[in-house]
Image (cartoon, rainbow, N blue to C red):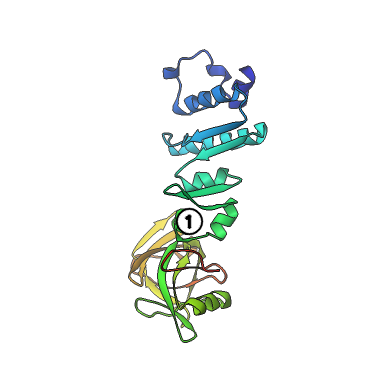
């Protein structure tokens, strides 16, 4: 028991009753009860959901450090994709009880198997736009605006004719309003310090881009955006599977 308490940094609180403990301390006590049983696997069912943001980050780090020290399998159930990305060695993405993808966090982020996974992993969520091939050019289905696609994406779209284009907010490049840039009007600005989120409408859909805060955008400004080469995703319009 003492070893488990030391690992969880709760030795000073062993003589306290549960009502005298904070939320984070109670979570550590619950983990300690599991540790002293020396199980072959741990199951955490949304253990951080009732904690405030600061404490959630602290306990999240402690659980990850604990898994590295104990070297015991841990199954962590969460609806928070940030928790999944930061804590997991492998992620299982479920929808209605069906496995959509099982892979490393990096692979799930970079190569989502379908549109559901792509929209679930990442914050803010991935932007989606219907696109189609017109001649040798990819265009947004609504409005017919040309989309600057890399050679591989253009080839994939050419095979199917129509698809759903997915672009993460962090994978938009800001360019002058040239022929290959999509002109957008800034509707809302969210400064985050390290970067800035801008909200805009494109092809009848609301979208978000993560840009350099040094640009200091303002509501009403017009910017030219283009997807970064090699960072776009294409999905089948019918079943949402990734087009590879």
Most extreme residue toward the bottom is 135
Q: Name the foreground residue: 50 vs 212.
A: 50
Residue beneath the point at 56% across and 68% down: 244
Q: Name the foreground residue: 19 vs 177.
A: 19
Give above or below for 42 relative to 172: above
Residue beneath the point at 46% across and 66% down: 166
x and y percentages locating residue 240 in the rendered image: 44, 63
Q: Name the foreground residue: 212 vs 151.
A: 151
Left or right of 69, for residue 128: left
Left or right of 203, for residue 133: right
x and y percentages locating residue 93 in the rendered image: 50, 50
Left or right of 143, for residue 14: right
Q: Quadrant of the N terminus?
A: top right
Most extreme residue toward the front is 98
Q: How many marks?
A: 1
Q: Name the foreground residue: 53 vs 162.
A: 162
x and y percentages locating residue 30 in the rendered image: 51, 25
Task: Provide the residue designation for mark 1.
Answer: 117
């Amino acid at each position: 028991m003492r070893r488990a308490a030391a690992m969880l940094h709760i030795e000073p609180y062993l003589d306290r009753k549960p009502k005298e403990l904070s939320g984070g301390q109670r979570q550590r006590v619950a983990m300690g009860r599991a540790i002293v049983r020396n199980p072959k696997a741990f199951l955490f069912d949304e253990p951080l959901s009732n904690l405030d943001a600061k404490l959630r980050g602290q306990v999240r780090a402690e659980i990850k450090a604990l898994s590295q020290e104990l070297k015991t399998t841990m199954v962590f159930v969460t609806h928070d994709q940030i928790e999944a990305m930061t804590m997991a060695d492998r992620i299982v993405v479920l929808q209605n009880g069906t496995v959509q993808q099982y892979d490393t966090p990096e692979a799930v982020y970079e190569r989502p198997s379908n549109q559901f996974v792509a929209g679930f992993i990442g914050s803010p969520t991935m932007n989606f736009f219907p696109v189609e091939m017109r001649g040798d050019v990819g265009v947004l289905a609504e409005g017919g605006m040309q989309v600057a696609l890399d050679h591989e994406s253009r080839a994939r779209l050419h095979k199917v004719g129509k698809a759903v284009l997915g672009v993460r907010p962090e994978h938009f490049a800001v360019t002058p309003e040239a022929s290959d840039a999509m002109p957008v009007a800034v509707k809302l600005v969210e400064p985050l310090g390290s970067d800035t989120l801008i909200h805009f409408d494109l092809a009848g859909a609301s979208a978000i881009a993560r840009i350099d805060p040094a640009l200091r955008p303002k509501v009403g400004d017009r910017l030219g955006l283009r997807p970064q080469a090699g960072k776009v995703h294409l999905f089948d319009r019918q079943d949402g599977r990734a087009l590879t």
